[in-house]
Amino acid sequence: MVFKRFTDRLISAGTTAANTLIHGPEQAEKIRQLESMGFSPERARHALNATEGDVDRAAELLLLGANEEQQQHDVPSHNNNATLAAIGNNHRNQTNNNHQGTAVAAHNDEQMRRAIDESMRANQREEARQLKEVIDLTGGDTHNNAAATKAKKNNAQQKKNNPAMKQPAKQPRGVKSAATINAGKAAATRHNNHHQNNYKTKTLDQTHPNVQLPEKLSNKSKEEQILRCAHRVKPHVMAVDTLLRVLTSVRNSPDNPKFRTIDRSNANYIKFVKEKTGAEDMLLAMNYRRVDGKDELRLERHLVDEALLYLGISALEQMRTSDEYMEGKRLRAFHAEMRRVAKQNGSEMQQNGMTEAETLIRLEFLSKCPKEPPEGRGAWMNVYLGDESENIEGSRVKRRFDGDDTLEDVLNWLGGCYGNEVLDKIRGTSREWCLCDLNRYPILPLDVEKHGKKTLQYLGLFPSGKFGVRLSDDAWRDRKESDLGEGFGIHGSARGLGAASRSMLH
């Protein structure tokens, strides 16, 4: 009996090591869990194969098998008890029946062991067959051959440790666990997909066959490219004027290489043409080509096409009459004015000198401003002249204000910084310029005449006021607030604690 237990432990240890090598640490861990419940490793692995690796279902299956065996053992015992009662508790018959029950239990254990061994051999044959298929598909890959050799060594070691595996009985065809069959199918599918598709990325036509992509601009005709580029570039005033000047010079002097070469590193080209939508594409449509090794565009003499030049010049001249071009022209003139006004900032004028009359005007404005709160109190109010993207030097000024300071106080401070020209164009009858709250979207002008006496807190400009001097549109200049767009007094939201609603301000 001691030798049998030692042999069982030796076989269990060898089986566990084989499980770790063949099925991996995860499967071996599941087998150890079932062993801790009192089941042998062979029965545990067979149950796991039958339940596709589910530990809970495998434990239920093993428990059901144990109950059936117990019922089989109880039947002879019940019969024996009835026989003993019938013959008057004969001691000799009782001993014989106990030996008979022990023989039946040993027979059942032997049958179970044989079934488990047959299942193990079937699984090993199936794994060997799948491994052979993979080797055949890969054309005798070295890595796969090494894996096959290792598997053969493991099988030989298992046969050596388990003598019952040396002469396997004939296994009927089709005895396979569901887990083994599904794993083999999945492995074969992955392998076939890998070698058939070679991991090729599917194109958009394959993934979205019904999507119609627009044709690339470079694939269209030269005429259509020129017209489309002209429409794209029309909001950019300087780009339109520069392109028109270049094309006109080439048409008038096609033999002059100076007009047919454009330096892309030139500061003016970078600022007005290079980054503007459609500008450089239009030059490429006129047969300009990038020169290798040089940052320039060149139009070869034999590529000069008078018809394309005529079409490009006509399209650009037509764009100069569009609303987008005219609006861009107005904005360019406005920012030129902002650059001139920014040079009149107090700090700039102190360096260049300020007239006595101008000094008196600015001091009068500053005398109407409240005292600036010390650091740690109030909030910063920033004012920008023109669009921030223009990066106008001297166009930004800032100062701390309290929440109960009024909008009129901000205007007086602005007059002390830039003089009365800015205030006259904001508050005058012309309303040429307007003061906007840049923290709201969409940006709406502030009616300085209507709300001049209201506090910054009430107007929603505290504690982070951000003002901008912008060019007024026709609706604001004509005082037609209803024409500023639907929802003029509704768009945006009131900012800050105690701020009035939009409907109260507009």
Image: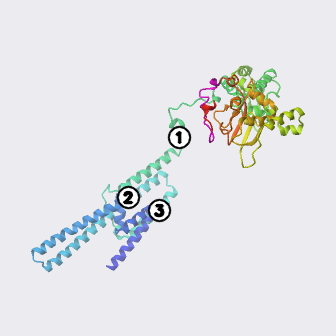
Under circle 1, the secondary element is loop
Q: Which one is earlier in the sequence, the residue at label 2 or at label 3?
A: 2
| Type of secondary structure dominating the magenta stretch | loop
Q: Find residue 149 and name its label.
A: 3
Q: Residue 262 location, x and y as percent?
A: 79, 31
Under circle 3, the secondary element is helix
Q: Is residue 316 left or right of residue 496?
A: right
Disc 1: which residue: 202
Q: Is residue 78 left or right of residue 199?
A: left
* Magenta part of the chain: 481-498
Q: Find residue 54 and name its label.
A: 2
Q: Residue 315 location, x and y as percent?
A: 71, 21
- The disc labelled 1 sits on which kind of residue? Lys
Q: Nearer the viewer, residue 306 or 131?
A: 306
Give the alpha-carbon distance from disc 2 to disc 3, as whole Å: 30 Å
Give the alpha-carbon distance from disc 2 to disc 1, as whole Å: 37 Å
Q: Residue 68 location, x and y as percent?
A: 25, 64
Q: Is residue 359 left or right of residue 244?
A: right
Looking at the image, is mark 2 or mark 1 nearer the viewer?
A: 2
Give the alpha-carbon distance from disc 3 to disc 1, as whole Å: 37 Å
Can residue 382 be seen here? The reply is: yes
Q: Residue furthest left?
A: 87
- The disc labelled 3 sits on which kind of residue? Thr
184 to 1, vertically: above or below: above
Looking at the image, is mark 2 or mark 3 nearer the viewer?
A: 2
Q: Quadrant of the N terminus?
A: bottom left
Neighbourhood count class around disc 1 (C-alpha, 10 Å): few under 14, some 14–19, many 20 upward: few
